[in-house]
Amino acid sequence: MNYWPLVGILLVVAGFALRMNPMLVVTGSALITGLMAGMEPVKVIATFGKAFNDNRIIAIVWIVLPVIGSLERFGLQQRAASLVRSLRGATLSRLLTAYLAYRQVISAVGLHSTAGHAQTVRPLVAPMALAAAERELGTLTGEQADAVKAMAAATDNVGLFFGEDIFIAIGSIVLIQQTLKTYGFDLTPFQLAVWAIPTAIAAFLIHAARLRLFSARLRRTAR
């Protein structure tokens, strides 16, 4: 058995440990792995090209990034924050709870890529959450601002994770189905999606409570 291709794993570990560019590390490691496996250099590059072409839908996200960057340059974050300041009933916990519900609903119908850290949290949700917190508490410290941003990102994670399993045409449902099948439980994707609904509701209630506790904790530290 040829163990030399495993050198690529060591290169990935070393590259990340040295804080090198992840794209260069992964690409270089893949090239080395292919060469160590006995593939010709041209064949390695051809394999890269075929994989990219087969999964080109993934590259669509790069089209969105320049649009988001342009919107931020022309004041999207400032306008979002200004909108929140103009709403009387907008509090930090209410804002993030509303986003949690929105994230779960769109994930449940298969639109999980229409929101996310790059698409909505950084340009919209985080600035709006900061503005809502400043309305309640006044000027935030650097540590408090970072905590608010982190909670905005965590809210997106919770909404996506517990919402997407309600949508039957997603990889996680297939993974759960196959795992349960090995233990003798033969369930359909629809059955799994239905039973994901109570879990999603419980996750919403638990995280909504966490948001209220987080907001209360911020108020205590601001005094």
Image (spheres, grey):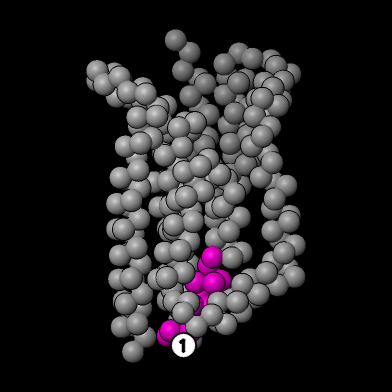
Q: How many marks?
A: 1
Callout 1: helix, strand or loop? loop
For residue 49, side relative to residue 117 (left or right): right
Q: Quadrant of residue 141?
A: bottom left
For residue 211, side relative to residue 76 (left or right): left
- Quarter of the image that includes the N terminus: top left
Whole-percent x, y for residue 204 in the image: 35, 55
Q: In which quarter of the image is residue 96?
A: bottom left
Residue drawn at x 62%, y 42% as measured from the top left = 23
- Quarter of the image that includes the C terminus: bottom left
- The magenta-colored residue range is 125-137
The residue closer to the viewer here, 117 or 211, is 211
Residue drawn at x 54%, y 65% as measured from the top left = 125
- The residue that mark 1 highlights is 138
Residue drawn at x 45%, y 32% as measured from the top left = 168
Residue 133 sits inside the magenta stretch: yes
